[in-house]
Image: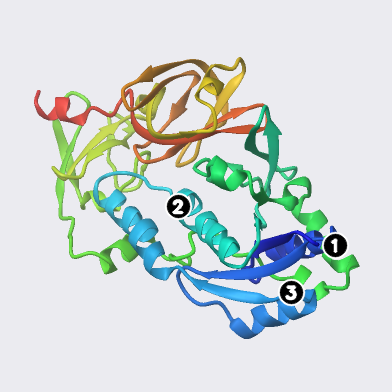
């Protein structure tokens, strides 16, 4: 009997290629389309699955998506954090809904079109970076646990995007191979996140005071919602040096400004951890990746300290404009070990400035 696998179908080339690859490997493929924000074109989706000769089911996750992903996004920005909704979705929504669908449909495995691989190491499963380093999506998967990893397939981790398109062409699916891919946060659809937040909350953010590092008031801002850590636009110039947003206190409607060099930090406090094995943090050659505004490359780690509720990460090279709410993801070579959320860096204690 063929092993059943549920494939998350989005209507794009990646999920299509995933389903086709697994079917050619002998799996009994079942397509599941997750409706998380807006419904996809059902007729187009059915046509894709007809070409693959696989059944298609739909699962409505819109209420859960709004409660978990959208709410945390809006609440995060209103609280002065920089959230990552794609990480939240992968950790709490997308994979879990696919796994629930698999259980209901009598399948053991699930699969997605992510450009990341899966590796077993000493009885534990880990994501690894995809072959296509330009499309590698492992960073967004740090919150996925063993319950899912042990039952998941991500075959596109062994291919580049161009290889996937070329292969689809050789299989006779030129129309699908040429489809444009979706980019960015799905529920924003290219809109400014601030407009979205204003439309989804009754909270308004009025003008407030900008302080420098010494606690001196140096100007006014247009509301903390309009700013992110590392932002230069809308900030002033003092003594010929441009100022950047170095921190914010949303509750007090206060911004902290500093010159560019003042936004570097070598120490990060990280909470809300998800690690496949805690001792992995002490492997030699550990690296971290922080996404966001500015110079936040993947870099080395000198030391990791266990602290209440998380870890303190000492970086080999300072990162720039790291903001509370951003994910910090741990790697060992190409292996994704897990990650967590920035609680603060060296420059995040704003209340002390207000009390000076």
How far apart marks 2 and 3 lie (CA) works out to: 27 Å
Which residue is painted at 51% across and 77% down in the image? 39
Which residue corresponds to mark 2? Answer: 92
Q: Position of residue 335 (x, y in %)?
A: 65, 32
Classify 10 Å Cα crowding around label 2: few (below 14), some (14-19), many (20 and above). some
Give the CA distance from mark 1 to mark 2. Answer: 30 Å
Taking 25 as reference, is 218 above or below it? above
- Whether residue 316 can be seen here: yes
Reading the chain from its start, which is encountered first: label 1 or label 2?
1
- Residue carrying label 3: 54
Please give the label number shown on residue 24. Answer: 1
Label 3 crowd bin: few (<14), some (14–19), many (20+), radius 10 Å: some
Across the whole image, how many numbered discs are drawn on residues?
A: 3
Q: Nearer the viewer, residue 48 or 134?
A: 48
- Residues at circles 1 and 3 in contact by the CB criterion of under 8 Å: no
x and y, in percent, of residue 166 in the image: 85, 61
């Amino acid at each position: 009997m063929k092993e059943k696998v549920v494939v998350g179908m989005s209507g794009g080339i990646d999920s299509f290629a995933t389903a086709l690859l697994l079917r050619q490997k002998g799996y009994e493929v079942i397509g599941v389309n997750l409706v998380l924000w807006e419904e996809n074109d059902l007729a187009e989706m059915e046509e894709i699955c007809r070409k693959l000769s696989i059944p298609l089911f739909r699962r409505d996750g819109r209420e859960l998506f709004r409660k978990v992903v959208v709410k945390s996004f809006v609440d995060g920005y209103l609280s002065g954090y920089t959230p990552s909704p794609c990480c939240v979705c992968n950790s709490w929504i997308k994979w879990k809904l696919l796994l629930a669908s698999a259980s209901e449909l009598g399948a053991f495995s699930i699969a997605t079109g992510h450009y990341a691989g899966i590796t077993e190491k000493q009885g534990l499963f880990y994501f690894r970076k995809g072959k296509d380093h330009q499309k590698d999506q492992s960073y967004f998967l740090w919150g996925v646990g063993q319950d899912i990893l042990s039952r998941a397939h991500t075959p596109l981790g062994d291919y580049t995007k161009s290889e996937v398109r070329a292969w689809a062409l050789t299989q006779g699916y030129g129309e699908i191979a040429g489809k444009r891919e979706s980019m960015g946060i799905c529920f924003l659809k290219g809109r400014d996140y601030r407009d979205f937040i204003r439309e989804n909350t009754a909270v308004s953010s009025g003008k407030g005071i900008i302080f420098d590092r010494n606690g001196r008031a140096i100007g006014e801002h247009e509301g903390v919602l309009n700013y992110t850590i590392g932002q230069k636009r809308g900030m002033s110039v003092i003594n010929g040096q441009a100022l950047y947003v170095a921190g914010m206190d949303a509750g007090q409607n206060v911004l902290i400004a500093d010159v560019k060099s003042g936004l570097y930090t070598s120490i990060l406090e990280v909470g809300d951890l998800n690690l496949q094995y805690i001792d992995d943090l002490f492997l030699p050659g550990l690296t971290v990746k922080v996404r966001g505004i500015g110079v936040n490359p993947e870099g080395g780690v000198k030391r990791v300290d266990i602290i209440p509720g998380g870890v303190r990460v000492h970086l080999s090279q300072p990162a720039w404009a790291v903001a509370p709410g951003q994910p910090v993801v741990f790697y060992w070579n190409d292996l994704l070990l897990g990650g967590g959320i920035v609680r603060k860096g060296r420059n995040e204690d704003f209340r002390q400035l207000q009390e000076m």
